[in-house]
Image (cartoon, rainbow, N blue to C red):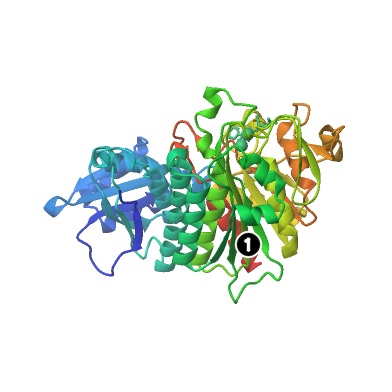
């Protein structure tokens, strides 16, 4: 199964299919490609609100013209181009066009976003079919003429998209083929291939570090937990204090003895989406050589049932020394994240971001279009992150972390309990995590947008890889400002 490649087109005339992107303001530029009669046709069709045209050229090559609709609010301009690219994908599949060269004839060049939407929409996960070729709707190569984008821009986008696909792949892998060991192997392989460093702590080391949260979650599993430490430290890093990314790596969440019902459990292979995103970001940051010092921490385990499982009511001692009364074994993510957040303190980080499919409450309150976030980092960081949310259309909304929400976490037997009273569950989860931080920190609950049961535009069904494009954009600006 081949994934789409984005590449710069060679100079000079091409013998491939051509796709010309235009908009109403740029429509006269189409005369470089179209005959007078074709120009008249397109002008009339645009007036009737038709936007995609296919012209046959010698040797069966196609000249495809897409006139983008007039853009509405500038905040939606790039997203409209991505969605238009995804719509064109359907037409290209009908015409069996798998390779083409993209040209820009727009007043406002949005070629990269257009190709991004098309490429993201073309993703398929077919490896477990006996005959994947029968299901494959291939899009092989998008070549960019220099009018559309520079070679450097194309390569950068190609790498970011590969990172999204890697994150989607990991989320889509079923638990039968992807446990904590497999996850740590992806970390190791990616580190080796792309030149960041990785250290995988096995169960003995995790025990020596007294990571009681991670160990409690993994107790019923026959596959040992892993704690992955990633680092990208380029010589030209602009941040003196590292930025730490923490990803929830629950490779399957049955809920433990607080067992989930089948209809909530059936897609819980997605519960390592935070970890997948962190790994994806490291590949993109290292391959594109972002000048920013990054550390990644991934506590990885499944959350299973068994005679050795942690019981509701048990008390555990965390890596930080804090004791926690575990009243609900399904609130496991915060246990292993808490150990990772405490571990992060030794780096004296300038900023810590954690990504986690943490609560059903976030999904119920906000659905799958938005990442809800909360935390103690400064307003400038929050503003930049929200701006990256708009840039990439992985939008963010902030929830309050007022101290009163923490009252819910008082235990009458230990320092904390792991669940609140039931209301505002995404915030009590955040309050729990906050307890283990002493640095500027933001928690991103991606439970809503990380996994879709049906496709939504170019966000294909199942794992979306949400957070990779968002944080790549954020890091790029973090590095340059
Ligand atoms: N992994 C789930 C959260 C989740 C729900 C992720 C839906 C993706 C989609 C998490 O571990 C969990 O089960 N949380 C519980 C916490 C509760 C017991 C306090 C929840 O949200 O129901
Ligand atoms: Zn759970
Ligand atoms: Zn979970």
Q: Quadrant of residue 236?
A: bottom right
Q: Is residue 436 visible?
A: yes
Residue at image position (74%, 63%) is: 346
Left or right of 79 on screen, residue 52: left
Q: Counting other residues with Cα less than 10 Å from the Cα at mark 1, is it few (<14), some (14-19), or many (20 or more)?
A: many
Q: Residue furthest bottom?
A: 235
Q: Where is residue 341 drawn, in percent x and y? A: 71, 52
Q: Residue furthest left?
A: 59
Left or right of 66 on screen, residue 278: right
Residue at image position (75%, 59%) is: 345
Q: Where is residue 441 drawn, in percent x and y? A: 74, 53
* Pointer 1 residue: 295
| Helix, strand or loop at mark 1 | strand
Left or right of 81 on screen, residue 75: right
Q: Is residue 68 visible?
A: no
Q: Quadrant of ligand 1?
A: top right
Badge 1 residue CB within 8 Å of ligand 3: no
Left or right of 310 on screen, residue 67: left
Label count reads 1
Q: Where is residue 70 drawn, in percent x and y? A: 46, 43
Q: Where is residue 391 drawn, in percent x and y? A: 57, 51
Q: Nearer the viewer, residue 92 or 261?
A: 261
Q: Nearer the viewer, residue 287 or 434?
A: 434
Q: Nearer the viewer, residue 44 or 91?
A: 91
Q: Can you say whether 50 is above or below 377 in the image?
A: above
For the C terminus, the image quarter is bottom right
Q: Nearer the viewer, residue 5 or 384?
A: 5
């Amino acid at each position: 199964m081949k994934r789409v490649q984005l590449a710069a087109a060679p100079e000079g005339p091409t013998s491939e299919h051509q796709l010309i992107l235009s908009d109403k303001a740029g429509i006269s530029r189409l005369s470089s490609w179209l005959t007078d009669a074709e120009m008249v046709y397109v002008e009339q069709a645009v007036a009737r609100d038709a936007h995609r045209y296919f012209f046959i050229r010698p040797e069966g090559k196609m000249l495809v013209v897409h006139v983008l609709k007039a853009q509405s609010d500038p905040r939606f301009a790039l997203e409209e181009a991505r969605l238009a690219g995804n719509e064109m994908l359907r037409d290209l599949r009908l015409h069996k066009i798998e390779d083409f060269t993209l040209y820009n004839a727009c007043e406002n060049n949005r070629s990269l976003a257009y190709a991004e939407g098309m490429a993201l929409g073309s993703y398929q996960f077919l490896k477990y079919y006996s005959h994947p070729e029968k299901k494959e709707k291939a899009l092989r190569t998008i070549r960019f003429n220099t009018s559309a984008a520079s070679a450097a821009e194309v390569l950068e986008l190609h790498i970011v998209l590969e990172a999204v696909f890697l994150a989607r792949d990991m989320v889509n892998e079923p638990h039968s083929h992807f446990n904590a060991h497999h996850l740590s192997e992806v970390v190791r392989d990616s580190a080796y291939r792309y030149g960041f460093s990785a250290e995988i702590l096995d169960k003995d080391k995790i025990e020596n570090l007294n990571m009681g949260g991670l160990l409690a979650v993994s107790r019923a599993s026959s596959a040992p937990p892993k704690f992955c430490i990633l680092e990208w430290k380029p010589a030209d890093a602009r941040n003196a204090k590292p930025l730490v990314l923490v990803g929830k790596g629950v490779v399957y969440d049955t809920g433990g003895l607080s067992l989930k019902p089948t209809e909530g459990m059936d897609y819980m292979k997605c519960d390592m989406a935070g970890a997948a995103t962190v790994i994806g970001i490291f590949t993109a940051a290292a391959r594109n050589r972002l000048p920013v010092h990054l550390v990644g921490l991934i506590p990885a385990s499944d959350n299973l049932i068994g005679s050795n499982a942690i019981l509701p009511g048990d008390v555990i001692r965390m890596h930080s020394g804090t004791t926690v009364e575990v009243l609900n074994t399904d609130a496991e993510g915060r246990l292993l994240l808490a150990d990772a957040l405490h571990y992060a303190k030794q780096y004296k980080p300038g900023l810590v971001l954690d990504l986690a499919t943490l609560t059903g409450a976030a999904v119920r309150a906000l659905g799958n279009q938005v990442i809800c976030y909360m935390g103690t980092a400064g307003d400038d960081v929050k503003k930049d992150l929200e701006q990256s949310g708009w840039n990439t259309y992985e939008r963010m909304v902030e929830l309050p972390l007022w101290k009163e929400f923490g009252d819910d976490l008082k235990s009458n037997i230990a320092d904390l309990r792991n669940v609140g009273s039931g209301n505002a569950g995404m915030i009590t989860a955040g309050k729990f995590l906050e307890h283990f931080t002493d640095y500027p920190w933001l928690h991103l609950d991606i439970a809503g947008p990380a996994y879709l049961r049906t496709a939504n535009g170019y966000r294909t069904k199942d794992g979306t890889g949400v957070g990779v494009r968002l944080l790549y954009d954020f890091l790029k600006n973090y590095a340059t400002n």
